[in-house]
Amino acid sequence: VGRDSGNTGSFVFKIEHRHRYSDLPPSATASQVGYVGLILPVLSDIKTRLTNLYWKQNLKQGNVEIIAGMIDTTDWVDVYALASPWHGFFNFAMATGGASIPVPADAALGMYINAMLTDQFYIIGGFADSNADSTDPFEGFDTFFNDREYFKTLELGRVTSRDRFYLDNTHVTFWHADEREAAGVASGWGVNFSYSKSFNEKWMPFVRGGYADEGGTLLQKTFSVGLGYHWGENNSLLGLGFNWGQPNEDTFGPDLDDQYTTELFCRLQVMKNRQITPDIQYIINPALNPEDDQSWVFGLRARLYF
């Protein structure tokens, strides 16, 4: 939700309540099959939480954007058009960072700056509190100023135009995370690459990869390739993605198998303001499952909006 201030700035906030309807929420699926990753993490049992509470200021006719406050860093880091868990892929390996970037929890106190350097080249940089807790967001003032353990990123990218920022986007993202002493997580750094392009407003292939050196990430190496296809009035979407992932030894220990994930989803615009998305995932070598060398995961997402 945004509240326009009447000039070039706006106040943005988002409050959610997430709870399960069965014994286990969909977000617990990954641990049930022994998968190193996240499967539809937004559908959890975390209860009431804050996602965003920040001020956004536009400058230079919108070519510079500054945000400061409690933020969801996935809105500003390694973004592409199919990354949203509400609209796109269920599996986090196909989304922000390919599971190789240790993004903080939502409502992380921080600041980001997004600037168009030319008509085609842009830069995004910022930092946020690595110890954020979206269920107790104001505790973040204590961890931000006293613990001083930050997640920092710098992204350099190229687009065909500002209006097609998410549709035709190539970028490289560098990140560094401070040691989280109380959580027992080592400091780390990494780099990610992303290429996605829309053809004829219908087809969108993508290639994405990442490398992490410690930092408490899920994967230390990741590579994804896939395709999106829009039809109808571009509201219905078919998505197919393949991911290879190597679990982070610093997080899970050595000698784990590499994982291979295939995901196919079909987002159906059944009414003007209703979407239904069936989803199938096939996982080979779930790294934390010594008994099974493959798993099938079936999902269904419904979305009603106004």
Image (cartoon, grey):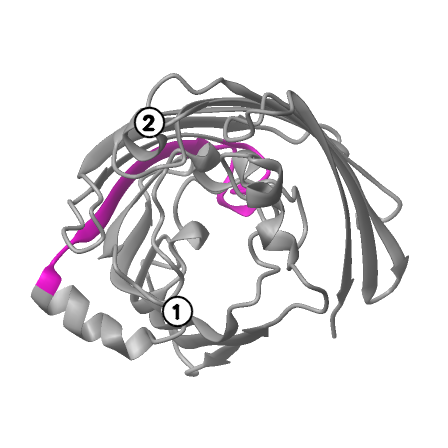
Residue at image position (83%, 64%) is: 274
* Number of numbered markers: 2
Cβ atoms at labels 2 and 1 below 8 Å apart: no
Element on which disc 2 rests? loop
Which residue occupies the foreground of this view, 100 or 159?
A: 100
- Say few, some or many: other residues with alpha carbon within 10 Å of mark 2 (under 14 / 14 to 19 / 20 or more): few
| Residue found 8% across the figure and 67% down from its top | 146
Give percent across and percent down for residue 43: 62, 60
Left or right, 157 with respect to 151, comes to right
Q: Secondary structure at mark 1?
A: loop
Image quarter (top left, top right, bottom left or bottom right) of the C terminus: bottom right
The residue to which callout 1 is attached is 134
Specify the quadrant that holds the N terminus: bottom right
Residue closer to the observer: 163 or 263: 263
Position in image of residue 128 (x %, y %): 25, 57
Say if the magenta span includes residue 255: no
Q: What numbered label is drawn on residue 80?
A: none
Name the kind of residue labelled 2 in the image: Gly
Residue 241 is at least partly visible in this image? no
Query: Considering only vertical position in the picture, is 191 above or below 166?
Result: above
Q: Which residues are magenta?
A: 147-169
How packed mark 1 is, by other alpha carbons closer than 10 Å (few <14, some 14-19, many 20 or more), is: many
State the CA–CA distance, disc 2 to disc 1. 28 Å
Residue 87 appears in the rendering: yes
Instruction: State the residue in front, 27 or 127.
Output: 27
What residue would you read off at disc 2? 253
Residue 302 location (% of width, % of height) = 78, 60
Image quarter of residue 255: top left
